[in-house]
Amino acid sequence: MPETTGPIGRITRCSTQSFSGAVHPSALSRPAFGAFCQAEDTAGEIKVIGVIYDLRIEDDPLARQMAALEDLPAEQLADAQKNRQAPVEFSALTVGYEQGDRIIYALPPRPPLTLSPVFLLSGQDLLRFTGEASFARLILASPNLPSEQLLAAALRSAIAARPEGDRDRYQLLAGRTVARLLAGDLPRLENVLGALR
Amino acid sequence: MSLDLPELLPQVQQLSQSVQTQQSRRAEQLQAALAAYRSLLELPPDELHHRLTQAGSRWTGARPSHDALDESFPPPPSTPGLYVIGADGSQIYPDRHAAAFFFLVNLAGICLQHGSESAPRTQTSTRLYFEPEQLRYESDLPVESAWVNLQRDLGEMSMLADLAEGALEGHGLALLDNSLLLWMLLQARGAGERELDRILKAYLDAMRRLQASGAALAGIVDRPRSSNVLALAGLASPSAEGVETEETQRPPFPGLTDLDLYLQLLPEGSRSPCFELVSPLNRDFSTAGQAVHFFYLHTANEQLLRVEVPDWVASDRALLDRVHAGLLREGQSTGGYPYVLVRAHELAVVTQAERSLVEEWIGRELSARGIPPARSRKSQAKTLTSGVGRRR
């Protein structure tokens, strides 16, 4: 699924359930909460698909000190934003994988490889993976994550990737899937649908 | 836990009592030092010259330079669009317990222009020293940490000269995160005279290249512990009149530094007069036209820098003002310490994780060639107990 414009970063930490990595300074504006991304597993046979659930800027005392200034010198701002290794870290929840031609909405047998490049999923690849909204199951089953907000953001990404004429149909399909998964938990269902509106 | 706490407790109490006594003694010493400094300002120049001569060749201190001692030096106007470059270095020292004997020097430089929205240019250079002739002196003794420091200091000055020649447009400021004097020449005890001379010559050549580039060169020492001006003030005090040479070798105000003195005297943004450092090592620099002078700069609230400059900067008021104003501008966002040096340090520093990585790579490469990368038995034994509390 290589239909992206270059990797957003590389993996530094991973498990079968999630993976995290550093964002390339040149790609800081691309990853977003709820965006789909992919990386290869250790054997190169599986493409693991994740949804970005967190973007963090690591603690940096120099940046903190500079941020407190009212008049930051122009050359130091340029240095901080263009030169210094911006310690931005992303984390993605695994929501499925692709093996051969098959898409499986379950945890992969192996995690992605350390330092694997991570690409954003877009175009036909994104349409294909989100063709069914079954990835919602793994998002809703994740403890300690803002799962309803994350699911709504992921669905918004999937809706936006579709042609305008197809968006209502997909929204209805996704709504039904979520309603089925949260049939016994109306407050959470309301949260997802509320965040989707 | 192996400390005997009941035995330690009274000693801690004695320690705090001792600190209290020292503090009140320091306050008295400081008043005496200020009085001596005032005497220095009033002393006729020929009398001061006489006492400096009388102090003898072993006396180490500050000699009045091109500035008048009673002159004040408020912040000069800054140069718009000033180019500033900084260099710093870091190292991995040789470890005779490691799998292989080597050392590493990592250098970093940065060049920025005040007010520019372009990102500064950065440069790093990493060099591994591993050939037998790099690891042993001509006397066949293994090199020591001081020799590594010398290579690092020489590398820093050379990188600064390279950057100045390539990047500065006439009126730049070149900052070194170190004293300008190569003190390590006195520490590398195993090195022969020829080897030390080679280093000194290369270092002085780099300083000359900086001079030719038109840059104003300055070495920055944060929290200096020196007391050269106090030594001069000691010579000027009325009690020093006619004292023997032996007597002047002792610090006149023990426990005090120039920092204590100038914290009382310098308003924020101001600098002290420039002094020439009197030391045997500076004589070598002086012979080469690079005598080291220094002044103190109050950059921010109670933050003082010792700024060392070569003679060709100390004798040129425009260059001195460029250093003074440039340093104040550089320290605005970093608590008084120059931004370029904060960044050069960040780029140069070799972290513990990187040290481990280098050792791991070397171990892996040795293994691939069938050489077992064993650390010494002593080193291995230490890892067995590290991180574990001692047991009886």
Image (spheres, coloured by chain):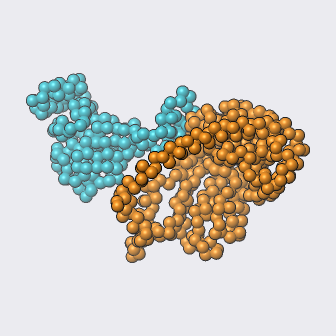
Q: Position of residue B221 (x, y in %)?
A: 64, 46
B365 above or below B209? below
Q: Residue B40 versus residue A159: which sits nearer the camera?
A: B40
Query: Would residue B13 appear left or right of B373 to someone viewing this image?
Result: right
**Total marks placed:** 0
Rendered-image quadrant of the C terminus of chain B: bottom left
Query: Would residue A133 appear left or right of B208 to someone viewing this image?
Result: left
> In the figure, what tint was chain B given?
orange
Q: Residue B283 versus residue B377: which sits nearer the camera?
A: B377
Q: Residue at x 64, y 50 (%)?
A: B178
Q: Position of residue B194 (x, y in %)?
A: 71, 69
> In the figure, what tint was chain A given?
cyan
Q: Residue at x 72, y 49 (%)?
A: B251
Residue A73 visible in this rendered orientation of the protein:
yes
Q: Position of residue B259 (x, y in %)?
A: 67, 41
Rendered-image quadrant of the N terminus of chain B: bottom left
Query: Would residue B128 appear left or right of A6 to someone viewing this image?
Result: right
Q: Residue A45 versus residue A162: which sits nearer the camera?
A: A45
Residue B303: quarter of image: top right
Q: Position of residue A190 (x, y in %)?
A: 17, 24
B152 above or below A72? below
Residue B284: quarter of image: bottom right
Residue B82 visible in this rendered orientation of the protein:
no
Residue found at the far right of this picture: B46
Q: Residue at x 18, y 47 (%)?
A: A107
A119 above or below B204? above
